[in-house]
Image (cartoon, grey):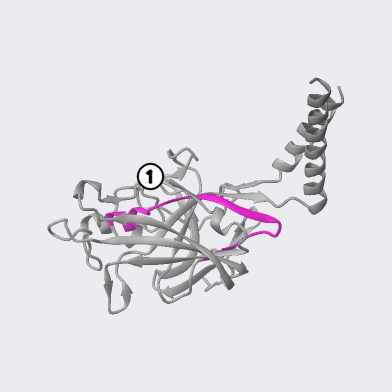
Amino acid sequence: MKLRILFLFLLAFIPSFAQANLLVTFEDKTVFTGTSLAGGGSFFNGNSGSGLNSNVGWSSQGVFFNNSYENFGGGFEGWNGWSYSNVVNTTTAGFLNQYASYPGGGSNGLGGVSAGQNYAIAYNDGFGGTPFFNLPSGMLLHSVDLTNTTYSALSMRNGDSFAKKFGGPSGGEPDLLSVTLNGYDSLGGTGTLIGAVTVNLADFRFAESSQDFILDSWQNVSLSSIANARSVSLTFFSTDVGSFGINTPTFVALDNLRLTAVPEPSTACLIVAVGSTILIYRRKLTKANR
């Protein structure tokens, strides 16, 4: 009877701790800059509507994402860092379609697509700084869903005026595009590097060309090796490099950032104490029944 009471107490307590975990889906973002040229959906790229330059960044569910927006005038603008979007456009090539995920919407968390749902887009133009996000205190990284943008994928698949077709004319050239998530112990992608997680967004290095791929679905990526990071910065690598750096469009789409709450010391001690008590009590019952 005592064992049952202790067990029920632990079951009642653990859910309150689990509820503190966080899934960042970006559905709290409702202010948008513009709409897609085709396919539907809207995006926010740092333009608050005033058209003024900005480097304020934005937050979703306590996670801060950096952004730098610049208005060049005459209808031309540029940005770096993070935007958010719900654009659905898998067919339009070129930089005018910067805000679309290649699968055709946000991640449903099961490897599939949820059209019309928000997701984030990271972009490193090579000049305006590295995309990064800051984690709320008391949270650990767990995992995230990543995929290509339509702009990057079609550029690699077909080539364009700036970047090569991956694999080259013969399809046999060993091309690669990857993104690395670098975990740091301080905010803003600074401090000591804790570790890094690299994801291949396109890989044409296989001996069998049938294995070559351009990522076209949402991929769940474990971040357990950098769980203790306070911030994460993104860096890109491509085999297609020119005089001004990487030629391949350096974009990646992100959704369903999963964070785990760090238990308070008193909470952790209580869980251990209750668990130890149950274990000791079970051992006593075992000995008594022999």
Q: Classify residue 177 as left or right of residue 16.
A: left
Q: Classify residue 160 as left or right of residue 22.
A: left
Place of residue 280 in the rendered image (x, y in percent of width and height, measured from the top left): 81, 35
Tell me which corner region of the image, top left, top right, bottom left or bottom right, holds residue 175: bottom left
Q: Classify residue 148 as left or right of residue 187.
A: left
Q: Nearer the viewer, residue 88 or 113?
A: 113
Badge 1 marks a residue whose secondary structure is loop
How many residues crowd around disc 1 within 10 Å: few (fewer than 14), some, or many (20 or more)? some
At 16% from the left and 57% from the top, the residue drawn is 172
The stretch in magenta equals 132-154
Q: Is residue 151 magenta?
A: yes
Residue bearing mark 1: 217
At 20% from the left and 53% from the top, the residue drawn is 207
Q: Is residue 185 magenta?
A: no
Q: Label 1 sits on what residue type?
A: Ser
Place of residue 254 in the rendered image (x, y in percent of width and height, measured from the top left): 48, 53
Q: Quadrant of the C terminus?
A: top right
Place of residue 225 in the rendered image (x, y in percent of width and height, measured from the top left): 54, 57
Q: How many marks?
A: 1
Q: Is residue 249 above or below residue 268?
A: below
Q: Is residue 148 visible?
A: yes
Farthest front residue in view: 290
Place of residue 136 in the rendered image (x, y in percent of width and height, measured from the top left): 67, 59
Farthest bottom residue in view: 243
